[in-house]
Amino acid sequence: MSDQDYREFDPNETDNDISDEVIEEVTGNKDSSKDDKKDNKTTEFCYICHRPDNITGPLIKMAPGMSVCTECMQRTFDSMGSFGFGGGDNSKSNMDMSKMPNISFLNLGSLFNDGPKLKNAHGTAKAADEKDRPAPAIDINNIIPPHKIKEKLDEYVVGQDYAKKVMSVAVYNHYKRVATGTMDDIEIEKSNMLMLGPTGSGKTYLVRTLARLLDVPLAITDATSLTEAGYIGDDIESVVSKLLAAAGNDVERCQQGIIFIDEIDKLAKKKNTNQRDVSGESVQQGMLKLLEGADVEVPIGASSKNAMVPTTTINTRNILFICGGAFPAMDEIIKSRLNKHSSMGFMADLKDKYDDDKNILQKVTVEDLREFGMIPEFIGRLPIVFATEMLDEDMLVRILKEPKNAIIKQYQKLLELDEVKLEFDEGALHAIAKKALDKKLGARGLRSIIEEFMLDIMYEIPKDENIGQVVITEDYIEKKGGPKILLRTTGLIPEKAAAN
């Protein structure tokens, strides 16, 4: 060291221009803790201003090998606002980016404290860029057998015995496949399902009940909102993002969940059109790998990908896909296939032979689905095809009173809170079922009909504390009379008074 490097300095002075290395060489006091920190921590630099993290503070990781400090990120937001993107006072236009699709802003502080975090199977948080470990195998001894799954479904769903049997077996085989992986080096294929049925026949309710009984995450999405990548609408990967959110950002639990895609018939190929079918056949093509099993990159805590949202990779190999749809006009396709013979001669086949067959959708085949507009590759990845039954009057009456959470039981519970007993005559139940059949809404129409007739009763009962029992009659449903109202005796509901 030359003489020019030595000069007088005050060790307590903070504005010295002498480096720490020179001070340590002069004084002979070397701080070993600094060396330990240097060895244990690698200095990171901001991608924009190139300042180290010991000056800027924690950096925001944008991509592998790319980190940005909070000051540079804030300047970026401010510059966007100066060009009219933020909608602030300095905006040069009235454009509000908060209302623009597929663009979202995050609180920078939340990236270090309250940001979305992935979870492992034990419920503890893990970093978003942590490599996914193999999901723990499901214990094959704890998988519910098909007959018990159907027994549980019978408690909530009336009828649809064939559909419940098919779903119970398919789900049982699927989770056996997840538990074993391979069996004697034979890889078991997925048991994805395609469920057809008229509106209000209980397709969505069946899947929701099944997922609740199995205690697995469930995501229900509508195929009408899906579009090809690059067009306005939801990308195909958004269905997996919804399942990740339903699993509480637990990747391992998400990879063993169920995805139900409703209105799948809206993805049929458009006939006689020269325009690009961005929400039909293109979506079917894009879903092929998703149904079969592929690694999908999805955002965490958001519905769309952008530079401000962390992403993770989900493998769909063990995710069970169930597709459902009403498939209108499918009955005409099936009838035309079944009417093979000519309508003339001794072997004539009447054209109206199958007009009275309410469950004609159960005769559907792969050829019918192709004629409807579903591509062969898509149908091949949904090997289990079945249809629900059309609801008749007797089934609607059973739906009103038999399930655990039947509609009538819900209203009886509501009035029980007011210490009023509610009853329905058998004739009233059949009258409600007939009105639902006329509306052609299936089981969905039952609640709207009951709401209409229960409105005045629910409004008047809190007024009079002397009302103890209400009986809904057929005449009241047919608007030929009113309900029977019984007053309390000795301050109790008549049934309670008789018991005493």
Image (spheres, helix red, strand yellow):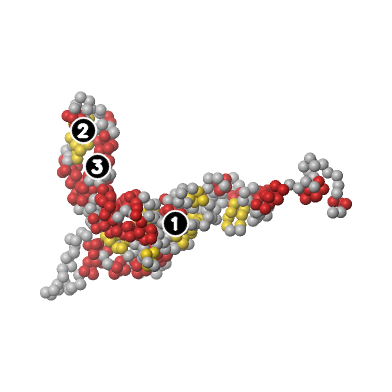
Mark nearest the camera among 2 and 1 is 1
Question: Taking 68 as reference, is 470 left or right?
Answer: left
Which residue sits furthest top? 490
Who comes first in sequence, dot 2 or dot 1?
Answer: 1
Residue placed most toward the observer, 135 or 446:
135
Q: Secondary structure at mark 3?
A: helix
Dot 1 alpha-carbon crowd within 10 angstroms: few under 14, some 14 to 19, many 20 or more: some
User: Which residue shows up at 62% across the image and 53% down it?
Assistant: 68
The disc, 2 or 3, on the residue closer to the chain's N-terminal end is 3
Q: Which residue is mark 1?
A: 135
Q: Quadrant of residue 50?
A: bottom right
> Residue 89, percent across and down?
59, 45
Q: Report which quarter residue 320 is drawn in.
A: bottom left
Question: What residue would you read off at disc 3?
Answer: 408
Q: What separation in Å lies between label 3 and label 1 (alpha carbons)?
A: 43 Å
Tell me if I can see residue 422 in this picture: yes
Real-space Cα separation, disc 2 to disc 3, in angstroms: 15 Å
Q: Secondary structure at mark 2?
A: strand
Q: Is residue 375 above or below residue 25?
A: below
Viewer-proximal residue among 403 and 253: 253
**Residue 339: horizontal and vertical position, in percent?**
20, 70
Q: Nearer the viewer, residue 407 or 438?
A: 407
Identity of the residue drawn at 19% across and 40% down: 424
Does the CB distance between marks 3 and 1 fall below 8 Å?
Answer: no
